[in-house]
Amino acid sequence: MFGRPAAEADIQRHFRVSPPSVHQMIVTLERNGFIRRQTGVPRSIEILLPPENLLILEWLGIKTSKSL
């Protein structure tokens, strides 16, 4: 997952869960408007929340302020 969008298989390996678990998680995130993906396009998961709304980034010490 170095610089490219994650595939469901990447997520499965990272979290050590089953393929159906990852797929259900992806479907749930998409249904709730947190991500978007293109049908039939591999690695098309796109996070729709602005980085400042991803509290895990703050917890990890990653700065999320916009510098435009």
Image (cartoon, rainbow, N blue to C red):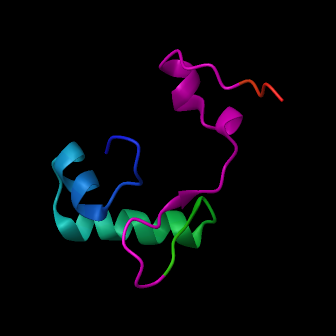
Q: Residue at x 47, y 63 (%)?
A: 45
Looking at the rendered image, the quarter that the N terminus falls into is: top left
* Residue 19 percent across, percent down from the top left: 19, 67
Between 68 and 48, the one lying in front of the other is 68
Q: Is residue 8 above or below residue 17?
A: below
Q: Most extreme residue toward the right, as rendered?
A: 68
1 is within the stretch colored magenta: no
Image quadrant assignment for residue 26 = bottom left
* Residue 66 percent across, percent down from the top left: 77, 28
- Badge count: 0
* Residue 46 percent across, percent down from the top left: 54, 59
Image position of 64 (left or right of 16) = right
Between 29 and 44, the one lying in front of the other is 44
* Residue 37 percent across, percent down from the top left: 51, 71
Image position of 17 (left or right of 43) = left
Image position of 21 (left or right of 29) = left
Between 24 and 4, the one lying in front of the other is 4
Q: Residue at x 59, y 30 (%)?
A: 55
Q: Is residue 54 above or below residue 40?
A: above
Q: Is residue 21 above or below residue 56?
A: below
44 is within the stretch colored magenta: yes
Looking at the rendered image, the quarter that the C terminus falls into is: top right
Q: Residue at x 68, y 38 (%)?
A: 53
Please state the extent of the stretch shown in magenta in the rendering: 39-64
Q: Most extreme residue toward the top, as rendered?
A: 61
Q: Is residue 2 above or below residue 24?
A: above
Image position of 61 (left or right of 14) = right
Image quadrant assignment for residue 30 = bottom right
Q: Most extreme residue toward the bottom, as rendered?
A: 40
Predominant SS of the magenta segment: loop
Q: Residue at x 18, y 54 (%)?
A: 17
